[in-house]
């Protein structure tokens, strides 16, 4: 009990609770809307919307240049608030320029892109604007994370998702816009909230409009190696869904997407722990003491156990509840959910073990790992989708992220060696001592 009080007093539990509440609301609002949306949208509509989402998320890597990750490191390391303000301005300027260039490229190659991706060319152009809004939302949320203000983070995330879901329901039920309504809802929500968040930070002088060339240089050095990493990370879901559409049908892409959306609840929990722990873990990594390294190990290991446990609970509950929760057309989603949830757990743990990599700014080697795992995923997906359709894609996702997690952990150890053996021994010993303290003791006569 005293240990729990100490954890709560340290602020980690409070921050994790705040981020978890925000992320659960962000994922829970669309999740609760699923019964309505799956009955008003066909699996084909969901499939096309999923492909648009992959396009816009891929463009986030180009437009954002991983500026939110660089901002977190910058604000964590910097002793002067002015550095963070100038860097945030540089990130905003860069994203505007990158979004404009992406729109021009999409306009110039609209016809071949439409043929390759199966989405109308004019809507692909809108994906660049959607990506810009997403980047600004990310930057605002990361600013509050770095300042350890989970309330601000929750407001930004939940407001954007609430507006998006309400617009999705209106566009699908009132105007019957199908997948186009879902795209418009996402576009309007991220651009509106992103613009208002940046305006609010500017009004509070958290953005210094007069940035410097050094800030742009830092953004390029930090984010440049991560662009292939982010794009190839997008390749993992994109390739699976594209192959399902080619070898099975677009309707199965929609069912697979719904299962992925439900399994993403595991990622929500994992992201919450990463958001709460990463600033503290980064601070601990700056202290050259064995005790600090042990605390980093305990933080990553504890978060990993919580994530795996939640994935197991979600899988068990979903097998009973999903047939009643979703419409008949989406009933097969429960079969895909188990491997997808396990893969999402590995993905969340991967995010935890990358903290030392980002702290040391060794982002280039992370891109090399992403290239390796992305190529591996293509091979897994092709073989397993040919074997088992969407179920094969689910297993490919789980296998890939397990390997990704292990490879990234090895990279992290090579960059910042942590005392995992000693850390796990002490954690197990403390845990066993706590368990034994609750067991009834025999009385001596």
Image: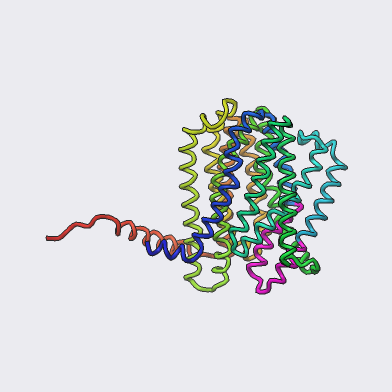
Q: Position of residue 42 (x, y in %)?
A: 66, 28
At horizontal 70% and vertical 56% (from top left) the residue drawn is: 226
168 or 388, nearer to the observer: 168
Side (left or right) of 444 relative to 215 = left
Main secondary-structure element of the magenta-colored stretch: helix
Q: Is residue 89 magenta?
A: yes
Magenta-drawn segment: 62-90
Side (left or right) of 420 relative to 56 = left
Query: Can residue 406 be seen?
Result: no
Residue 323, placed above or below residue 367: above
Q: Quadrant of the N terminus?
A: bottom left
Where residue 35 sits, quadrant-wise, is top right
At horizontal 69% and vertical 39% (from top left) the residue drawn is: 167
In the picture as drawn, the residue positioned furthest to the left comes out as: 445
Q: Position of residue 418 (x, y in %)?
A: 51, 64
In the picture as drawn, the residue positioned furthest to the right comes out as: 108
Query: Can residue 94 be seen?
Result: yes
Where residue 164 sits, quadrant-wise, is top right
């Amino acid at each position: 009990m005293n240990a729990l009080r100490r954890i709560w007093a340290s602020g980690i539990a409070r921050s994790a609770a705040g981020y978890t509440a925000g992320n659960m609301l962000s994922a829970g609002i669309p999740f609760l809307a699923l019964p309505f949306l799956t009955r008003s949208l066909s699996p084909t509509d969901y499939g096309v919307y999923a492909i648009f989402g992959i396009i816009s998320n891929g463009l986030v890597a180009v437009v954002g240049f991983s500026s939110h990750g660089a901002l977190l490191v910058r604000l964590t390391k910097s002793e002067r608030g002015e550095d963070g303000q100038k860097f945030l301005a540089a990130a905003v300027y860069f994203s505007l320029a990158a979004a404009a260039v992406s729109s021009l490229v999409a306009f110039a190659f609209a016809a071949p892109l439409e043929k390759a991706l199966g989405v109308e060319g004019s809507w692909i152009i809108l994906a660049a604007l959607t990506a810009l809004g997403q980047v600004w939302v990310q930057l605002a949320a990361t600013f509050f994370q770095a300042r350890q203000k989970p309330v601000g983070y929750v407001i930004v995330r939940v407001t954007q998702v609430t507006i998006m879901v309400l617009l999705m329901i209106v566009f699908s039920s009132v105007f019957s816009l199908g997948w186009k309504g879902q795209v418009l809802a996402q576009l309007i929500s991220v651009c509106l909230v992103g613009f208002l968040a940046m305006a609010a930070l500017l009004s509070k002088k958290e953005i210094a409009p007069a940035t410097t060339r050094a800030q742009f240089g830092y953004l390029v050095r930090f984010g440049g190696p991560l662009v292939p990493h982010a794009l190839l990370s997008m390749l993992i879901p994109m390739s699976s869904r594209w192959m399902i559409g080619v070898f099975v049908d677009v309707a199965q892409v929609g069912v697979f997407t719904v299962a992925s959306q439900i399994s993403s609840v595991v990622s929500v929990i994992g992201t919450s722990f990463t958001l709460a722990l990463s600033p503290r873990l980064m601070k601990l990594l700056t202290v050259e003491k064995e005790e600090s390294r042990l605390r980093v190990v305990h933080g990553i290991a504890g978060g990993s156990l919580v994530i795996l446990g939640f994935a197991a609970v979600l899988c068990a509950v979903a097998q009973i509840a999903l047939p009643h929760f979703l419409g008949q057309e989406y009933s097969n989603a429960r079969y895909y959910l188990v491997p997808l949830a396990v893969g999402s757990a590995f993905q969340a743990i991967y995010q935890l073990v990358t903290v030392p990599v980002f702290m040391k700014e060794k982002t280039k080697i992370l891109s090399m790992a992403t290239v390796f795992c992305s190529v591996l995923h293509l091979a897994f997906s092709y073989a397993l989708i040919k074997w088992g359709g969407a179920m094969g894609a689910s297993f490919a996702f789980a296998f890939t992220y397990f390997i990704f997690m292990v490879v990234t952990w090895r990279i992290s150890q090579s960059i910042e060696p942590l005392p995992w053996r000693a850390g796990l021994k002490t954690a197990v010993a403390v845990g066993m001592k706590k368990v034994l303290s609750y067991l009834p003791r025999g009385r001596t006569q």
